[in-house]
Amino acid sequence: MLVLSYLLVTGITTGALYALVALGIVVVYKATEVVNLAHGELFMMGGFLAYTLHVMVKLPYVPSVLLAVAGSFAIGILTDRVAFRPLMKEGLVSVLLATIGISFILKGVARVLWGGKGDYLAFPPLVSPEPMRIGNVMIMSQQLVVLLAALAVMLVFAAFFKTTRAGKFMQATASNPKAAALVGIHVSRVYMYTFGVGAAVAGASAVLMAPLTLLYPDIGFPLFIKGFAAAVLGGLTSVPGAIIGGLLVGILEQLAAGFIGTAIQDVSAFIVIMFALIFLPTGILGMRGTRKI
């Protein structure tokens, strides 16, 4: 029972981070119907920006976090203007290929800027690294910070899509770009800010996760796969689905590692994707109907 409790707590914390990654994927998909395959690399850049500001420049933690998220937002907007916008009218395949190209470019930039400092960089935690006991379960204090911050970000974005004008513009554009343009919505501007918001969410996820792991240029792809598995399981059009999917993927991953073996931990996301595509093609909370991936 003690082992199960520990695995569940760890799975929920890890799943909250996967949910944030999935949230960024869903934000972009809801507005553009494009899966940004460079989302993991945007996550990676957010982590390295925070490392540069907090560890190298010696800025306090909170300003470093805010500036790293703002920097990720700017990178998202820049990639939209340079790579995605010119190809939006060329079709889905062209845009997907552009996202792959951007991912390799960002990894190359990370290797040039931070590679000389070692492949794995440690980011100091916000709180004491000493574990704390909750009942019979030991949990790291940083894990609680991650969980609470992740929940706060999720609530903000759920409210964003349900109550704000910009969120409704994004959903209208995703539903029918031509109709959205006819009623006065600036579709290209919506796309630009959508990629920026998605990148900002990725940056926030990286800042939260960095103290629990190590930063390296290739960290983005494995996290993208797990976030994508969470988004597919929950439904690529659903913000609550991304949250549920992330938590489920995190819990299943930890249970598989604890009771089957760590060898299956890294492939569990692929199993979730296959299961979802076969048995839940629109996800747990996704909209019924045709879906483009």
Image (cartoon, helix red, strand yellow):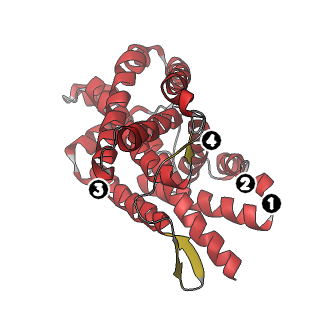
At numbered mark 3, what does the secondary structure look like: helix, strand or loop?
A: helix
The mark nearer the N terminus, 3 or 2, is: 3
User: Picture coordinates of residue 265 (x, y %)?
Assistant: 72, 54
Q: Which residue is mark 3?
A: 159
**Residue at 42% in and 52% down:** 239
**Residue at 50% in and 37% down:** 44
Amino acid marked by disc 2: Gln
Residue 7: quadrant of the picture: bottom right
**Residue at 29% in and 56% down:** 159
Q: Nearer the viewer, mark 3 or mark 2?
A: 2
Amino acid marked by disc 4: Pro
Say which mark, if any, is on residue 222.
4
**Proximity of marks 1 and 2: CB atoms separated by less than 8 Å:** yes
Q: Nearer the viewer, residue 257 or 68?
A: 68
User: Picture coordinates of residue 136 (x, y %)?
Assistant: 60, 85
Marks 3/1: CA distance? 39 Å
Q: Residues within 10 Å of mark 4 (few under 14, many from 20)?
A: some
Q: Nearer the viewer, mark 3 or mark 1?
A: 1
Query: Which part of the image, by quadrant, shows the N terminus?
Result: bottom right
Query: Which part of the image, by quadrant, shows the C terminus?
Result: top right
| Residue 35 in view here | no
Give the side of residue 60 with respect to residue 147, left or right: left
User: Picture coordinates of residue 177 (x, y %)?
Assistant: 34, 28
Amino acid marked by disc 3: Ala
| Residue 281 in view here | yes
The mark nearer the N terminus, 1 or 4, is: 4
At numbered mark 2, what does the secondary structure look like: helix, strand or loop?
A: loop
Q: Which residue is mark 1?
A: 261
Say which mark, if any, is on residue 265.
2
The mark nearer the N terminus, 3 or 1, is: 3
Marks 1/2: CA distance? 7 Å
